[in-house]
Image: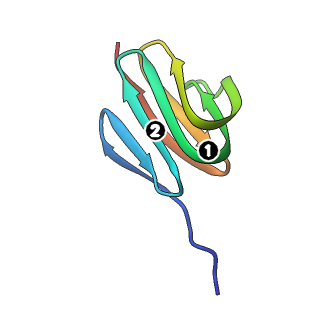
Amino acid sequence: NQAPQCYITPVNNLEAYFDCGVKIISGKGYLEISSSKVNLLKIYNTSGSLIYSKKVFNKEKIYLKEGLYIIRVNDKISKILVRG
């Protein structure tokens, strides 16, 4: 028996969905993270610099400048666009 694999599936330019209990929504100037369990969230800019790191649970809104970001939830990685 193998554990279920988790992956991030981009839905469209405004939203990405992480299928293992985490939902990431990109809004105008923010990301909203919803989770049913504690997850380590890290956000990097396109230069690779870590700009946010926190254990998240339930719902968290993170305000960011317009741009492309690399999102890491535990060991899964995706890119997401924040519009201004």
In the rendered image, which residue does mark 1 sit on?
73
- Asked whether the residues under the numbered discs 2 and 1 touch, taking CB atoms below 8 Å apart as contact, a structural biologist would say yes
Lower sequence index among marks 2 and 1: 2
Q: How is colour applied across the structure in the image?
A: rainbow
Relative image position of residue 39 (x, y in whole percent): 67, 44
Query: In the rendered structure, which amino acid carries the disc numbered 1?
Result: Val
Relative image position of residue 49 (x, y in whole percent): 67, 24
- Which residue is at a point 46% across and 26% down the rendered structure image? 31
* Location of residue 48 by image quarter: top right
Horizontally, residue 27 falls left or right of residue 55, namely left
Q: CA distance from mark 2 to mark 1?
A: 10 Å
Q: Residues within 10 Å of mark 2 (few under 14, many from 20)?
A: many
Query: In the rendered structure, which amino acid carries the disc numbered 2?
Result: Ile
- For the residue pair 1 and 12, the one nearer the viewer reads as 1
In the rendered image, which residue does mark 2 sit on?
24
Secondary structure under tag 1 reads: strand
Q: Is residue 20 above or below residue 77?
A: below
Q: Residues within 10 Å of mark 1 (few under 14, many from 20)?
A: many
Quarter holding the C terminus?
A: top left
- Which residue is at a point 47% across and 12% down the rendered structure image? 65
Q: Is residue 50 above or below residue 74?
A: above
- Which residue is at a point 54% across and 61% down the rendered structure image? 6
- Which residue is at a point 47% across and 29% down the rendered structure image? 32
Q: Is residue 12 above or below residue 29?
A: below
For this orientation, the residue located farthest to the bottom is 1
- For the residue pair 37 and 78, the one nearer the viewer reads as 37
- For the residue pair 69 and 11, the one nearer the viewer reads as 11
* Location of residue 1 by image quarter: bottom right
Relative image position of residue 46 (x, y in whole percent): 54, 26
Secondary structure under tag 2 reads: strand
Relative image position of residue 62 (x, y in whole percent): 54, 21
* Location of residue 82 by image quarter: top left
